[in-house]
Amino acid sequence: MKRTLDTLIRNCTAVTVNETFDIIEDAIIAIEAGRIVYVGSAAGAPEMHSRETLDAGGGLILPGLVNTHTHLPMSLFRGLADDLPLAEWLNNHIFPAEQAHIRPETIRIGTLLSVAEMLLSGTTTCCDGYFYEDAVAEAVESAGIRAILGQGVIDYPAPGVPDPSQNIAVAVDFVRKWKGRSPLIQPSIFCHSIYTCSGETLTRAKQAANAEGVRFQIHLAEAADEAQQAGLPDGVTPVIYADRLGLLDANTIAAHAVWTDAADIAILAKRRTGISHNPESNMKLASGIAPAPAQIRAGIAVGLGTDGCASNNNLDMFAEMDTAAKLHKVRAFDPTVMNAKTVIRMATVEGARAIGLDSIIGSIEPGKAADLVVLDIRKPGLIPLFHPESHIVYAVKGSDVRHVMVAGNLLVRDGRLTRLDLDDILDRANAIGEEIQLSNGQPKSQV
Amino acid sequence: MKRTLDTLIRNCTAVTVNETFDIIEDAIIAIEAGRIVYVGSAAGAPEMHSRETLDAGGGLILPGLVNTHTHLPMSLFRGLADDLPLAEWLNNHIFPAEQAHIRPETIRIGTLLSVAEMLLSGTTTCCDGYFYEDAVAEAVESAGIRAILGQGVIDYPAPGVPDPSQNIAVAVDFVRKWKGRSPLIQPSIFCHSIYTCSGETLTRAKQAANAEGVRFQIHLAEAADEAQQAGLPDGVTPVIYADRLGLLDANTIAAHAVWTDAADIAILAKRRTGISHNPESNMKLASGIAPAPAQIRAGIAVGLGTDGCASNNNLDMFAEMDTAAKLHKVRAFDPTVMNAKTVIRMATVEGARAIGLDSIIGSIEPGKAADLVVLDIRKPGLIPLFHPESHIVYAVKGSDVRHVMVAGNLLVRDGRLTRLDLDDILDRANAIGEEIQLSNGQPKSQV
């Protein structure tokens, strides 16, 4: 291998998250044209030359984390209202704030703010759904992160879609504009839910997604009363209803899937529909605890997600891993029910599978994209280190991320963003916060 | 007020956690002889002069966090074994590791490692229980953190106490050595549990604590089968048994208190016994979810704790706050059941009350000790800021801590420890990790 590569990463322990969960000490990873071309022990590696070398400082390197459910611009509403019943939170706080403050420029800043937080905490791919998704896509493209981006469809006037009768047309326009345009972005159609979209809207939106060959996203079975909210007859669960409408197949991502019984899980498994499991959002909004272990046992691709950070209130996938592992243990009264390796798979390769990107990302293997995270483990909370997978789930914080690469581009170096102007983003986000504050009449601190 | 003070802290938003939870924008805090002598708006403040001024950079300042349940030296065993049933974890991993590797020098390093992690993430007081507690106290004293330190009592051979018949004598010796010796350290007696100590041991240990005028700690009602493990007759709960033995009064701290029914809660409230609520440990070990909201409603002082970091696996009280708030919401299906202010109180003034230090610490008020934490909130995950209490619970990470003061001493400045040699601690902890690793025959990475 005498050719000159783009980058060699040396001096790291590689947590590959491959089929056998190999952990390679003193590993070397070679990258060319945005892809991994070699991973193995430095001792047995062939001689390789590269334009760039990254010394990982003895840290852990793992596949970039995959956040399977976000609403990126909602970072602007983080902490605007908490500790409230869902309906009051949505109707009295979030929806009015969206009506008053969401426009392409605020979308752009909110998106960049979220992308900054995600990159700095090790997330390299997200699966998003919101409105003005074209502005989200512009911001995401400029930031260099990988994403599936879904234009929202809802049967109410929405930001950028004042006339609900145009909701699917707007989504199709978005998809056509972004399909094949940017190597890291895949457009998608995101129907909000079965209780905010009619059966006809749901069916037409899914058919449009199929016709365009893109993925379909939906919040499904999130709260206990969803069937009632959607006016479903007795015995028809949200999953059964979605299946009857033809929404469920391998190109659909169901976010939440909290209230899924054995029959629902069997349907989702049969249709090969991916699930985004959002334990922290489901806890904070008191929605419930999804039966993720049973969903995984059924063979479903279950990824992890933070949800929008107005309902979490952060985008830190390391925190989400920790919570997922602990929550299912206490729910089942069984500490073995979801171990660290399972949770890491959910945050990487299974998340990638849930959103249909597992042939491209999710593990450190030759042929996969160079979406990588280097952790600084010389910290008081990470020494001694006996089992890397344990630390990653139970001890590592997003702030332990040192370097982040997406498609071979180093977007975080030594804990700093290389491509985004963080100070400018923070100043602009503060200004939007002031505007929101003034119209809400609530106390606000600026920094 | 023309006298010269020790320190003035300026340019901050003070989250006082006083009775009315006042939040003071553009606050100034004056410190003299380790105590707060003034807190208020800079605009209305008298002219004050100080030897030192700390510019808080527009950050939030809050009372130092109180971790009401730790086993400091167990940081050496973090991640040694996870995702296992409690008995297997304890008997096959933790107990053998303690027998083989716990000695005064490893106690010292493990303690310093934990103190470093705690200080860097905003904890200024802990309530600890372990063995060789004299070595813990030496390390804690050198670090300058505030602590209640309990010598462990258990009816088995233990590190430093090979003959269980001497367990109470050793504890009393420890208490007498440390009583009144160091202004920040209060010695205590820590009985492991009702299933590892006989009724006679428990009674004698509590009587010894009373005779010495120090606090008594015990793991109580942690796991569902504790009554059975302790051989209690039908209908006698761990709390009823502890009460019959005379263990419960205002000088006792019950750690966990997971399996407490209404009658148990009434007993604990009547006895004014403090509770250390450890949600993450209880989740990870699949012990259960403590009825903390009901315990609080009954008037009990319920503080937060991380437990030892072999069963968490971190000492980050910001993560613990986040988990506590979310866990109780989903357990009760009610997002209003434990709001951000309640959780902050648990991590500060109520924790202080649980361990009997609320006259000294827990809030930013004149007369209280200057145990303070300054958060850097110019971060992508913390902007905009609408409600400081929301960010503190749901968005702030331990890594957002910028400055930490204990009794007026700045122990963390700009995210760095001022008094401890972190590199030396990490190197020594790594060396102990190597030793543990070699004797366990498991893969180990060193950094």
Image (tube, coloured by chain):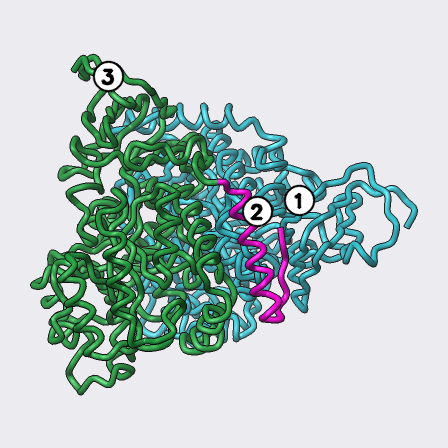
Chain colours: A green, B cyan
Label 3 neighbour load within 10 Å: few <14, some 14-19, many 20+: few
Residue A230, horizontal then vertical, whole percent? 26, 81
Q: CA distance from mark 2 to mark 3?
A: 41 Å
Vertical placement of residue B44 versus B5, above or below: below
Mark 3 residue element: strand
Return the residue at label 1: B57
Local crowd size for mark 1, using a 10 Å CA cut-off: few (<14), some (14–19), many (≥20): some
- Crowdedness of circle 2 by 10 Å Cα count: few (<14), some, many (20+)? many
In the image, residue A445 lies in the stretch drawn in magenta: yes
Q: CA distance from mark 3 to mark 1?
A: 47 Å
Same chain for the residues under marks 3 and 1 in the image = no
Q: Would you place residue A324 above or below residue A20 in this image?
A: below
Q: Which is nearer the eye, A40 or B113?
A: A40
Q: Position of residue A4 (x, y in %)?
A: 24, 16
Q: Quadrant of residue B74?
A: top left
Q: Are marks 1 and 2 in contact (CB under 8 Å)?
A: yes
The residue indicated by pointer 2 is B378
Residue A302 horizontal side relative to residue A146, left or right? left
